[in-house]
Amino acid sequence: MRDLPVRAARWSALHPWRAITGWLVFVVLCLGLGIAVGTHNATTEDYRVGEAGRAEAMATEGHLQRRPTEQVLVSSRSGALDRRAADQAAREVAARMAKLPEVERVAAPLAARDGQVLMVEVTMRGPELDARKHVGPLRAQTAAVQRSHPDVRVEETGSPSISKGVDAQRGSDLALSEAITLPATLITLLLAFGSVLMATVPLLLALSSIAAALGLSMMASHLFPDAGVGTNVIILIGLAVGVDYTLFYLKREREERARCGGRLGPEAVVELAAATSGRAVVVSGLAVIVSTATLYLASDVIFSSLATGTIVVVLAAVASSLTVLPALLVKAGQRAARRAGTRRPRRVRTGGGTGRVWAALTRPASRHPVLTLCVSVLFLLVLAAPLAGLKLVEMSRDTHSRAIPAMRTYDRLNEAFPEHRVTHQIVVRARPDRAGEVAAALAELGRRTRTDPLFTGRPRLRTSDDHRISVLELSVPYLGNSDEARRSLTHLRADYLPATVGRIPGAEAGVTGDVARTTDYPAHQNARLPLVIGALLLVTLVMTALAFRSVVLGLLGVVLNLLSAAGALGLLVLVFQSTWAEGLLGFQSTGSIGSRVPLFLFVILFGLSMDYQVFVVSRIREAVLGGVPTRRAVLDGIGSSAAVVTSAAVVMVTVFASFVFLHIIEMKQIGFVLAAAVLLDAFVIRIMVLPAAMTLLGEASWWPAHGVRPVRRPTLITADVS
């Protein structure tokens, strides 16, 4: 494995057109196979966790599971409702919907308490998650009724319509993100290399890696179902690591080319770069992959989907850096040599050396390491302080952007029909001969809730044909993300259910519904959190220790990653749990953070931080191998890598920050926290904390090794390119 980058570069250098063609064939093959097998989307069963999941499974067993429903509202555009026109529109809606094969049943039109809104509830066929694919014909009929009744407002909402709207919004958001990210990345690379060709190569390789990963993810979804977030994470991570890996390689190739002064051909120069940066890319890629794989321990379909997308795109990015990139560099070198009519290339900008700016930035760490370390760590701890008030919730449909038309209709539905805001389902499974006891206990439970202001409406009881499963539905006149709705769930589970159904011997019972789902998911995640974080810390320690043969650097890497992650999360809480930044970043604060965000940050950041850790410490280690004392090598290594680390950080921050402009609040939070974490990691951890710590540690940084062994230089290719 250690010589793999060199062997791959050597083969690509000798057969550049084969390598380039092979990569293009690989990308097309991945996409073709992916499209052929299709994407296996996660089903309702894949999302079931906790008591809510068990209750849903029991309800499904009795064919009493929740069906996808749509609500069509008929209201006045202004002033009082013309009841005659509204009745005609509602009847036409019901008649049209009843004829559709996607519809199971249509309820009679229902008037709001003030009589100003009519509602027609339509129950669709099929699984709940598939309904968004089939809601189009229903919405078409609603639009047709609106055209034939222009005097009233006819609009449709419901989980399928909202999901379809979210999908459409996600697509437009991704297009906006790409429109921001691609030009900004290209400009950054132009500034870094001063060459259109060299700036275009990283971007093209990143995009081709993303294309290959999309096909691979479609095939992988048949093992790990796609939860609808795979494409987002592939683009998010693919652009970041794809450009970074290429950037590291290009930077080193330019340094080697300048160092040899034209005495070596482009093949040999590329091979020298592979022996250093190529190996760093492999180590970094493996670190990201192994770190991300810990998400599978969360036993959650969304985290598994995130992990799969990240792993396949990092694999593709590493593969492109090891194969097609050396071939492209060789062809570019040969072209430059032919243009110049000599093997000696023109002088190139390498970005090497410490430079006055970076010398000034690293001076505090070298001259006052104790003070620099204390101030930097204190700064990060101050940023992390808001974490004490962190509030995690599962983001539900109540948090979706109101730019989605179905969400604005959803708000009007909640206002006109508060009894339809939240519904709890109490599911009971018992022997058929106890069906009478179960019905009596559930009736008693319903009577008790009538005097509780947290509940409203009449309970609805349904029983399976075999009398084994019973479902009682209770309405709550509060939004699903409200404290009142959560308290109503607590009362059901802790008080009403044990006092009624809980007294029936052998009966299994549970509460499900939207509130139960959004309550049980964070609880399930928190239970798995110690396992995932523990595995992540262990993996980071082992990977770093193996990469540099140093336990000290492994422990230091863990601590540094924890500091940058804590600082970034503190900033996230400060921005998104408050309202002061709503206008600036275009969001409506929920007073909370998405329950998936912190764990995703920890896992991805621990992997991505290895990019900088491996690249910077590798340069320090090279200087030590050359006989430079560790304290001096720290400055040389950081100075020589500062420019490329900065460019890589700018690219990553640009990619992640572009997600702040998306409408989906959880994606906003993920983009913001990753951008903040990369900034802290690149400009505080790697410029201040790491050099100060290694300066203080000195030779102890490499413990338990007594010294570092020289790295064997590759046997160079001496192909003539003149």
Image (cartoon, rainbow, N blue to C red):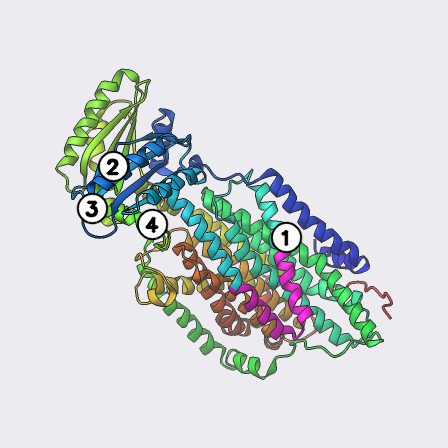
Q: Which mark is residue 665?
A: none
Tag 1 residue: 316
> Where residue 170 sits in the image (x, y, percent)?
46, 52
- The label nearer to you, 2 versus 1, is 1
The C terminus is located in which quarter?
A: bottom right
Tell me which corner region of the image, top left, top right, bottom left or bottom right, holds residue 548: bottom right
Closer to the chain start, of discs 2 and 1, is: 1
> Where residue 222 sits in the image (x, y, percent)?
56, 38
Residue appearing at x 36%, y 51% in the figure: 405
Quote the CA–CA distance across marks 1 and 3. 59 Å
Inspect the magenta stretch and tell me whether residue 24 lies in it: no
Tag 4 residue: 407
Tag 3 residue: 81
- The label nearer to you, 4 versus 1, is 4
Closer to the chain start, of discs 4 and 3, is: 3
Circle 1 SS class? helix
